[in-house]
Amino acid sequence: MSINNVKRWLTFDCYDTLVRYTESKSATMTDLISVKGGTKDLVESAWSVFQSSERRLQTEDFLPLNQVLKKSLKFALSEIGFDSTIADEDKMLSAVKDADPFPEVNQVLSELKQDYKIAILSNSEPDIIRFNIAKIGVAFDEVVLASEAKCYKPSAGMFNELIKRLNEDPKNITHIAQSFYHDMRTAKDLGFGRRIWINRYKKQGDFSYKPDAEISDMRRLHEQL
């Protein structure tokens, strides 16, 4: 525990750090297109468009995540000659809501709560994140969402909203995330005390933003703290 029995903050990205966000969306995309008679090549084309559209929409005038996902799906299916129905949109939203936590997440977070305060910083909204938190099965001390900050990571606005809500100097916060693009760079720029990269997908990092620690999943997180 921290000195003077004051619990320090650990802040977590949710999607692809705690739950299988991308994997769940990708599997749903494959199912949707297969039902429509699409081939593997069409799935790959649509998935590429979906990912680029989601990232682009999150840099434009703010839309809540459910709208970003619906628009991205519409663009993706249109690219390969299919229409996106309301049922298709509902399935994609369900893919995010029902995304399974990574197997170690519940136990690791439950143990960390004994010594730290824990928060989520997520590009999400209340009607989606509540399902994710329920599946994780751990109560967080704070949850800060894009729908509240009216911007998406990697925008500094998201992180500044977190700092404000925690009422804590960023140098006293450890941020833990999978994405260099969304999390690692901005957390360093804003002076977060420590940054731990959960490199689940064996990606190449950015040497100029080298994290304080890099681990392949959260099982070794406690020893890094």
Image: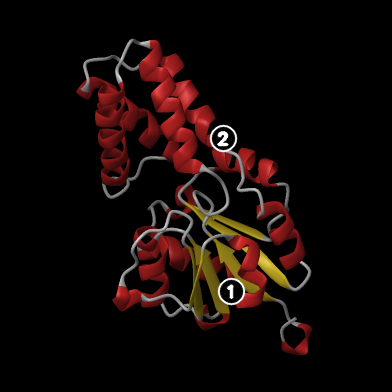
Mark 1–mark 2 Cα distance, whole angstroms, equals 29 Å
Give the camera-side residue of 88 and 66: 88
Label 2 element class: helix
Determine whether 89 is above or below 176 in the image. Answer: above
- Identified at 54% across, 52% down, the residue is 14
Residue receiving disc 1: 167
Choose between 162 and 153: the one closer to the eye.
153
Quadrant of the rendered image containing residue 185: bottom left
Q: Which comes before the other along the chain, label 1 or label 2?
A: 2
Q: Quadrant of the N terminus?
A: bottom right
Do tag 1 and tag 2 residues touch (Cβ < 8 Å)?
A: no
State the residue position of label 2: 97
Circle 1 packing at 10 Å, graded few (<14), some (14-19), many (20+), is few
**Image position of 187 (left or right of 103):** left
Q: Residue at x 66, y 54 (%)?
A: 105
Residue at image location 27% in from the left, 36% down from the top: 48
Residue type, label 2? Lys
Which of the two residues, 194 or 163, is positioned nearer the viewer here? 194
